[in-house]
Amino acid sequence: MRSISLRILASVTALAVMGSLSAMAEELPELVINEDIEMVTRTKAPAHLENLDEIRSGWTFRTKETQAFQMDDFDNPGMIFVDQALDTWETVDGAAGKSCASCHEGPESMAGMRASMPKWNDDAGAVWTMEMYINDCRENRMQADAWGWKSQPMLNMNALISLQSRGMPVDVKIDGPAQSTWEKGKEMYYTRYGQLELSCANCHEQNYDNYIRADHLSQGQINGFPVYRLKQANLITSHNRFRGCIRDTRAETFSEGSPEFIALELYVSSRGNGLSVEAPSVRN
Amino acid sequence: MELTRRKALMLGAGATALAFMPSMPATAAVEDAIAEFTGGADVGEGDITLTTPEIAENGNTVPVSVDAPGAVSIAIFAAGNPSHDVVTFNFGPLAASHSASTRMRLAGTQDVIAIAKMSDGSFVRAANQVKVTIGGCGG
Amino acid sequence: MAKGVKPRVKVPKSVSAGETITIKTLISHKMESGQRKDKEGNLIPRSIINRFTCEFNGETVIDVNLEPAISTNPYFEFEAKVPEAGDFKFTWYDDDGSVYEETKSIAVN
């Protein structure tokens, strides 16, 4: 919020100097959800990010109509799937006769989880994503079948749990045992893939705010995932978007849940440390 | 609906062909759909507001609002869709305004047309062009 | 009944008599247009919600005809008069004959 007020201050000063109303157009839109939850969509880049001064949510790159979809929970079609997950949360499944609610009570007990995802899991000795924690519960505590990463119940549950952290700053840990995974993800971010020889950085670090054909390039932040994407008219995960990006470089891509994408998710998440968790956000 | 590169090329070719033809079959067809709603009555200008985005970032979900004080019903048409009818709102006695909003699919850049049937049986019309972007990374 | 269809309706819980309210509705539905083809090139048959109605104590607020150009997860926003306390009834009609209903009561201060 601080950087926004500084910018507004700057435009007010410019206004005074220029004596013109045109500078008013510079005022940046702010994301307030349900006229209540103030979201940080622009802030100072985390210390590890050498090439950017300011990080920006993907929301700031969208048209006002797409932005509006996310400003009220009733206008946000992603909330349909959150509703469906609420039913699932209460539903007993598996041989242990448990539902999510049996151990965790209300979904609000999950507050904060999404903000730290993905994170190092000591018992497993690896970086785990939300999907892995959900399936661990299903298989080991509920004795139920694991959900596929792309399955609707998994997407829905991911959205419900993520929503509990909405408005909290993304804060993934990149040091300690997670560091080698993070380094691997960083290396991927700067690796050129495919016949087009494009890295993540080519578009989302060096050219954000420019247009690639008719697409307004964002910084590729994933603080809003899972997002309701207008194209698919459904929730999608960051791994789905990674796959689409790498495919568009005309490369053989990795799959959802692969060690490569888990590492990339950790690294890309850490580039958004300080932005608000927006899930489920709405994008084009 | 998926708008693939091939379809986009075909649409482009179709548009070029159209430009050389004396009549405009696509436009004619939407006028047919409108005539079905109006019963062929004259359509004038009047108190009707159609709100659409200037640019839709994705043609799958395009917000649209119509408002025509005194209307009995309002129909929306998409001139460039394979089927031109989009929606018809019929207002009952407990409608507090003769306005409504929804979200529609547009197959590409095209005109969106709203026709209101007024309580005296007359018809009024409003139309906007909506540009639908086909992104570089639509994937 | 189409799978996973779930209505959401936003209506205030209470109003002053004669007041105007804004109603928003959203229902999860694929709205298969009948224009798409599957991987084998066969046309996927149309399957949409073709009509939506909102009534208050039996009187019509709005009656909507939907065509395949309405987006997945159909959304409507409109305004209603509330002459007295009572029930809003919302009904969605599916091509496959299913009918989805939701009722919301409203009190008058």
Image (tube, rainbow, N blue to C red):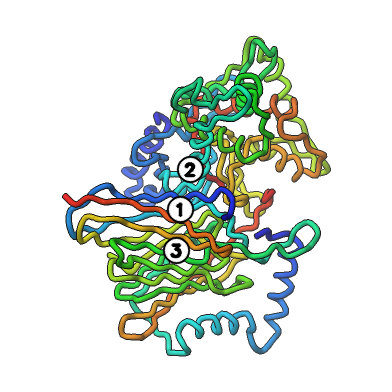
> Crowding near pointer 1: few (<14 within 10 Å), some, many (20+)?
many
Q: Residue at x 43, y 60 (%)?
A: C91
Element carrying mark 3? strand
The percent coordinates of residue A110 (x first, y second) are 49, 24
Where does label 3 land, which residue? Answer: C52
Q: In the image, are marks 2 and 3 on the same chain?
A: no
| Pointer 1 with pointer 2, Cβ within 8 A | yes
Q: Amino acid at mark 3?
A: Phe
The percent coordinates of residue C51 (x first, y second) are 48, 66
Cα–Cα span, label 2 and label 3 = 21 Å
Is A252 or C16 nearer to us in this picture? C16
Q: Chain of mark 1?
A: C
Determine if residue A102 is in view. yes
Q: Residue at x 74, y 69 (%)?
A: B10
* Earlier residue among tags 3 and 1: 1
Where does label 2 land, which residue? Answer: A79
The percent coordinates of residue B79 (x first, y second) are 57, 74
User: Looking at the picture, does residue B120 appear above or below residue A214?
Assistant: below
Where does label 1 land, which residue? Answer: C26
User: Which quadrant of the figure contains the N terminus of chain A?
Assistant: top left
Q: Chain of mark 3?
A: C
